[in-house]
Image (cartoon, grey):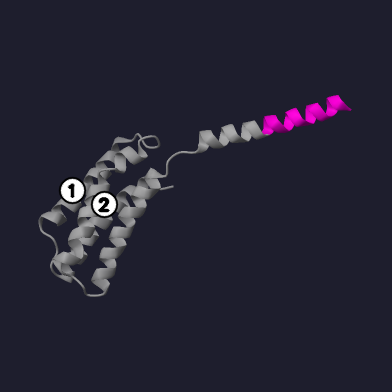
């Protein structure tokens, strides 16, 4: 009887140890999700500004700067998962669209809508090919 109890305890400890090890191996940083969440939040905020007819340079400047800064983290955030050079080109396209918009920040809703379309196309092209 004692052997059976020891066997069951050892089996349970082995299962628990295996679960802990597998969980530790599967755990990775949520950097890629966080990067996309911040970019999405900035895009949504700018879109809401356009819809609310708040289209001054001040309404977009900080959101564009944040979007541009976070866009620098796209490749490092996905480095473990995506090795395709096309992904790097899409990320560069997003940064170029953000740079262009920051160089001449939109001061009207029409200009802001055009800038958002440009940024959105850069996002959509990548999401079309790489989002799962």
Contact? badges 2 and 1 (CB < 8 Å): yes
Between marks 2 and 1, how big is the CA–CA gap? 9 Å
For the question of whether residue 127 can be seen, the reply is no
Who is closer to the viewer here, 71 or 10?
Answer: 10
The percent position of residue 19, horizontal first and vertical second, equals 62, 35
Q: Looking at this view, is 119 or 65 the one in front?
A: 65
Q: Which residue is mark 2?
A: 122
Could you say where residue 13 lies in the image, as x and y percent from the top left? 69, 31
In the image, which residues are magenta?
A: 1-15
**Circle 2: element type:** helix
Principal SS element in the magenta part?
helix
Please state if 82 lies on the left or on the right of 20 as rendered.
left
Label 1: which secondary element: helix
* Residue 37 showing in the rendered view: yes
Q: Which residue is pictured at 22% across the width and 43% down the height?
A: 92
Instruction: Check the image and name the residue furthest to the top.
Output: 3
Q: Is residue 111 left or right of residue 5?
A: left
Task: Please tell me how crowded label 2 is: few (under 14), some (14-19), or many (20+) other residues with Cα within 10 Å.
Answer: many
Q: Which residue in the structure is indicated by mark 1?
A: 96
Magenta region includes residue 86: no
Front residue of this view, candidates 124 and 65 = 65
The residue located at (28%, 59%) in the rendering is 42
């Amino acid at each position: 009887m004692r052997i059976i109890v020891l066997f069951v305890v050892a089996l349970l400890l082995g299962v628990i140890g295996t679960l802990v090890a597998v969980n530790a191996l599967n755990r990775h940083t949520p950097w890629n999700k966080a990067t996309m969440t911040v970019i999405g939040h900035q895009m949504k905020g700018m879109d809401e500004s356009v819809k609310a007819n708040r289209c001054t340079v001040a309404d977009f400047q900080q959101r564009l700067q944040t979007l541009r800064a976070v866009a620098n983290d796209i490749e490092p955030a996905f480095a473990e998962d995506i090795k395709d050079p096309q992904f790097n080109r899409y990320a560069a396209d997003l940064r170029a669209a953000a740079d262009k918009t920051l160089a001449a920040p939109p001061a009207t809703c029409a200009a802001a809508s055009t800038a958002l379309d440009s940024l959105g196309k850069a996002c959509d092209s990548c999401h079309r090919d790489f989002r799962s």
